[in-house]
Amino acid sequence: MQQNNNENAANRISYVGHNYDIGEKEYKKEVLDSLPEKWRLLHNDGYIHIHDLDAYGLTYNCLALDLVDSLPYAEFDGLDDTGKIMHLFHYIQNLFIKVGNEQSGGMAFANFDNEISDMLTKLNVKESKANFNIISSSIRELIIWCNGDHTRMGQTSYYITLNIGLAKNDFARKIAEILLEQFNNLGDLVFKPNIVFKVCNKINLNPGDPNYDLYIKSLKITAKKMIPTYILCDSDTNKENNPTDLAIMGCRSRVVADIYGHTGAIGRGNIANISINLPKIALEIDKVYTDYDKDKKIEMFYGKWDDIASIVKDILLDRYHKLCSLKKEMFPTNLEVKLWCESFNTDNLEDVFKHGTLSIGFIGLSEAIEILTGEKYYNDMDNYIRALGLVKHMKDY
């Protein structure tokens, strides 16, 4: 048996996965053929990539789980501390499995250190050396499972992201420390789950900050394993937000603003995303407008990008409205556990999904600037300014 392709680096070869690949390709073609020709051609000709075509109108992309208030605490009645700790991590792993087969993308804890400590505190688990040993073993097993399990669709590992760094007390600090140490100690071939360290002034950025030691520990691990990655809570983009509300999903989606009032990532996710291929547009502009100077080509590029982005917006809205028309029974785990900021127990799923995001992304900024100007953007200040201008133009759109 030979795997058909390697479109997803999280895949491995299996009988179930092989059959799934065959069906997935046929269904993706069916979905694509059902779309308006103009949309379909943009995807087929490589101007855009409609991600997760097999999920089009059937599910959302990713989610930062809102679990602290939704955990079924009654399930833990009668268990001792060891039992509570082990059952909590078993519950989380099982939740990853169920939710991971109910959506197309990744799952995240927005504040893993604080959320785990909050749940254990609510369960009256004491802070003791014996209990921390059990927590350490449980976190180790969770890391091993995230890195090595390939049961999703018979072949795929689950993409889990654990955001840490803002530990508010000694219990949460110990959770973050254990996570970092276990991830490091498990060796170079363990690269999941994705761990994101939230860098924040007065919390962990400078010597004397309460979590500065965790930041240094994280940096040393990144130097060896490229993970953890980082979100800068004090950057211009993020500084107006409460750092606890910020989080990065498994697919690196940043979910913060919400015109319906639920600001922040917790209990929210990305509905769908489409990437625009910048080098493809640049090659077309360079070929058609050969005699134009650099800035005129950039101007033409903006116009072509705007035209494509307008169509991408229509595709995303079509996908969103089809998703909202589904019955809530399509999401049994979300019906059972309130993981979103709104309950799925509604007659109109738009009550939930209006809190999600629709994203227009891009690929190939450096290559596009080089095609249009003949120089790499990082070797020429004028090109650097042009590249920033293009990013600003896309962001403003």
Image (spheres, rainbow, N blue to C red):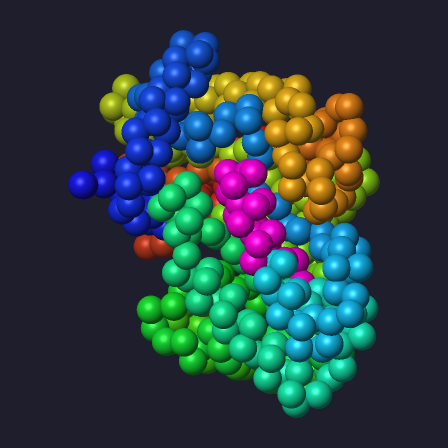
Residue situated in front as seen by the camera: 240 or 296: 240
Residue 110 part of the magenta segment: yes
x then y, percent, for residue 367: 31, 42
Residue 350 vertical position relative to residue 11 in the rendered view, above or below: above
Horizontal arrangement in the rendering, residue 336 relative to residue 21 (left or right): right
Please state the horizontal and vertical placement of residue 152, each as a whole percent of the image.
44, 45
- Indicate the position of residue 132 as horizontal and vertical percent values: 64, 83
Above or below, 94 against 329 in this view is below
Residue in the image at 78% along x and 70% along y: 78
Task: List x then y, in percent, for residue 389.
Answer: 50, 41
Residue 98 belongs to the span the image colors magenta: yes
Quadrant that contains the C terminus: top right
| Span shown in magenta | 93-111
Residue 65 appears in the figure: yes
Query: In the image, is residue 286 above or below residue 202?
Result: above
| Snapshot quadrant of residue 69 | bottom right
